[in-house]
Amino acid sequence: MVSRWRGLVVERVLRDVWVISGRAGDDPFVGDIAVANGRITHIDRSTRRPVRPTRAVLPGLANAHLHPTPALLRTALASITIDDNDRSPLVGRLYEALRADREALQLGARLALAETMSSGATCGCLHEYLAPEVAARQAAELGFPCVVAVHPGEPGWREVLARVRDTGAEVMLAGLNENDPANTDEALRELAAWAGELGVRVHAHVSETRERHEHMRARTGRTPVAHYREMGLLEHLYAVHCTAVEDEDVELLAAHDVPVVVTPSSEALLGDGIAPLAALREAGVRVGLGTDGAAWAGGEDVLRELTAAALLSRAVGGPGALRGGEVIELATLGGARVLGCESERGSVEVGKRADLVVLDLERPGLRPVLEGPLSTVREVIAFAATGADVIETMIGGTAVHRRGGTPLVEVDAVQDAAERVWRRAGGDRARTWL
Amino acid sequence: MVSRWRGLVVERVLRDVWVISGRAGDDPFVGDIAVANGRITHIDRSTRRPVRPTRAVLPGLANAHLHPTPALLRTALASITIDDNDRSPLVGRLYEALRADREALQLGARLALAETMSSGATCGCLHEYLAPEVAARQAAELGFPCVVAVHPGEPGWREVLARVRDTGAEVMLAGLNENDPANTDEALRELAAWAGELGVRVHAHVSETRERHEHMRARTGRTPVAHYREMGLLEHLYAVHCTAVEDEDVELLAAHDVPVVVTPSSEALLGDGIAPLAALREAGVRVGLGTDGAAWAGGEDVLRELTAAALLSRAVGGPGALRGGEVIELATLGGARVLGCESERGSVEVGKRADLVVLDLERPGLRPVLEGPLSTVREVIAFAATGADVIETMIGGTAVHRRGGTPLVEVDAVQDAAERVWRRAGGDRARTWL
């Protein structure tokens, strides 16, 4: 749909909105954003004054670490630790039951992607344990640009990787947890070699728990990050969680420009602790946010992850640790930087792709918004907005979600599939996890 | 409206809903709840099976610490510390401008109350700095049962207290912060005497920050809680925050049955730390939750406070620190206990008042819910539901909020009043707070 705006041919104009650029240092302002050919073509301050904006436009959010298919088991694993999770017979049976049910896998992936897109995510990184091809296919169907991590080493893994690439997704290699017996020096060197050969990153949970962190120190005499450097892996690493990293690790991550993704809700709910977001940012590490997984945490709503990041970082570091604009940057430009797509995505800027989130500021819980140099709009969004406030998510100028429109996933089918998996694994009768 | 249900005359039946009692030890089940004459008259397990419930019913939530009128300045004070807050000239000017504008005070109080009621709160405790009578009047108009704290000592305070009581609200006396120069031993003894004479509690911020905690230790040689015992105040105390309390304080609070209210989001966002919720509960202290104030934190949504409590407590204490049912108990029966109304409110129980919240579990972000002894319904609610999921809030059997119905506050009027106060205080031109 083409129209004219100030004498120019454009496809879409968002008028008199709060414009939040995605860069922490930029002041928000009230203006118009025009879109044509999938890109942002004009951004202007509003000339008609006074204007009282009731909508805000942010760059599309990046969900930089997400386990899609287990979303079908929402919160089911939230009452055990991440290490119990590896050891629990019921968790093992649930994964087996899910893996054996292709429709359930599809619906789990679709649920996670639908939820994250409807909460404003416009790109992401999928760490899929059970079915990378299924997750990549669902993302392609929904028009969600993403990187998909594929587990290397098993027979046929290169074919899986090729088929994931065929869906249009980029790929990474999935790494191993520090306490996995398969995580030998030989395996780490092999992983680094494959990553170099393929020119891709290795997506790994790094120092996710104190236990895993210490496990590697006991084995190698070094922290995980320091050991990955010795193994030649650090230059290829895409590090997730980093809850238990130490000061020397933060320096190494910065010196090697390792992208880091923090998933505050899930790390907190599992008791893994609070990642040093402020210290990582201060050291110059590029940092993004992810939701991890609805199976452990509440869900895939990246906007709620902003609040979680602020609560946890400021609880330990004070209100200066993370201001509203900085929180928003983490999930937008920060996310694009960790994914390596910041030239195309992550900020509201002329020439970039029109990946945009339109937020409704009309409900009482988001009012009032105060104007001026100390405008509260970024804090209102960072501390109070949720996915429920998203009016529209736009990817490359196309609305992929509109509030009140057709939902991206059918909830009754999700419930059916989840009950089937739950019964097959014996979850409906179990009284304990362990 | 009277109808018949299983041969009985009832006014309202909530059929085939997830029943969450509010007691952490009770398993949720699918059933029917009948209401007549403002009370719960029957609770039965559903007989028609299989039933797939899409709604959950909880006891109405208690918002046990809330500053109403400053909600008009949503998030405006979120980037400074609580102690800067006392010292900032701009904060002082904002409070003066708000205090001078009766319509703004009314709208601020109404905004806070409307937001908390529409997010499921059915009773609460209002700590109102600027205009206790205005806040009490707004609560009465909205039908919100509450206790209102009145600052004693100033000329005419007993008349204010009487007028607040005339609105139907109960009262408390407001205490002083530990670092307030007026907070002398003489003032504390006087406060204890007034509380005894009036038979009411003293609502005080206790050990809210490390700085305040240490301030009192420097002055008295004791922690605030220990000093309040010496001053005869502990038996009258209603203690809020307790972020910096020590182990010996927790024991004293338990031994003296002092109700404690924690406001996790606001304490975290202000950098005051993480209150030892799990330790307080373990010691047998009765603990409830509050939202504090939208001026500092995101808002007055008590359902989001459940998630904040879980995130922060589990980040430091592991997933066993606070399970889904325990989080829900804090905001329901726990809140009723701190307010002293647990014989009438706080649980879904035959004979209690029909203060109920009906939650919609239909959106993808709250699906699926798994059934059985390990049912996920409480975790889904505690970690993922927000005020946006409330279909209805019922107080004494009457719907005080229905989703899609007339909003309890007019947002344009709120925005007008806030802009007026902001301009009068110079907030629209200010570049720094201090």
Image: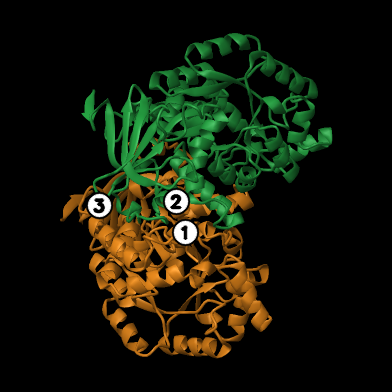
Chain colours: A green, B orange
Q: Is residue B208 left or right of residue B335?
A: right
Tell me the quarter of the picture where residue B420 sits: bottom left
What is the secondary structure assignment of the residue under circle 1? loop
| Residue sitting at x 41%, y 56% | B302
Q: Nearer the viewer, residue A319 or B250?
A: A319
Q: Position of residue A409 (x, y in %)?
A: 36, 27
| Residue sitting at x 27%, y 33% | A13
| Disc 3 residue type (three-letter) | Pro
Q: Are marks 2 and 1 on the same chain?
A: no
Q: Is residue A180 left or right of residue A218?
A: left
What is the secondary structure assignment of the residue under circle 3? loop
| Disc 2 residue type (three-letter) | Phe
Q: Are marks 3 and 2 on the same chain?
A: yes
| Disc 1 residue type (three-letter) | Ala
Q: Can you identify the residue that label 2 sits on?
A: A383
Instruction: Locate the N terminus of chain B and report the quarter of the image it occupies.
Output: bottom left
Q: Residues within 10 Å of mark 2 (few under 14, many from 20)?
A: many
Q: Residues within 10 Å of mark 1 (few under 14, many from 20)?
A: many
Q: Nearer the viewer, residue A158 or A349?
A: A349
**A208 up-or-down from B5: above or below:** above
Q: CA distance from mark 3 to mark 2?
A: 26 Å
Q: Are marks 2 and 1 in contact (CB under 8 Å)?
A: yes
**First in sequence: mark 3 or mark 2?**
3
Q: Can you identify the residue that label 3 sits on?
A: A50
Q: CA distance from mark 2 to mark 1?
A: 9 Å
**A316 up-or-down from A210: above or below:** below
Q: CA distance from mark 1 to mark 3?
A: 26 Å
Q: Can you identify the residue that label 1 sits on?
A: B78
Q: Chain of mark 3?
A: A
What is the secondary structure assignment of the residue under circle 2? helix
| Residue sitting at x 57%, y 12% | A160
Q: Residue furthest front?
A: A7
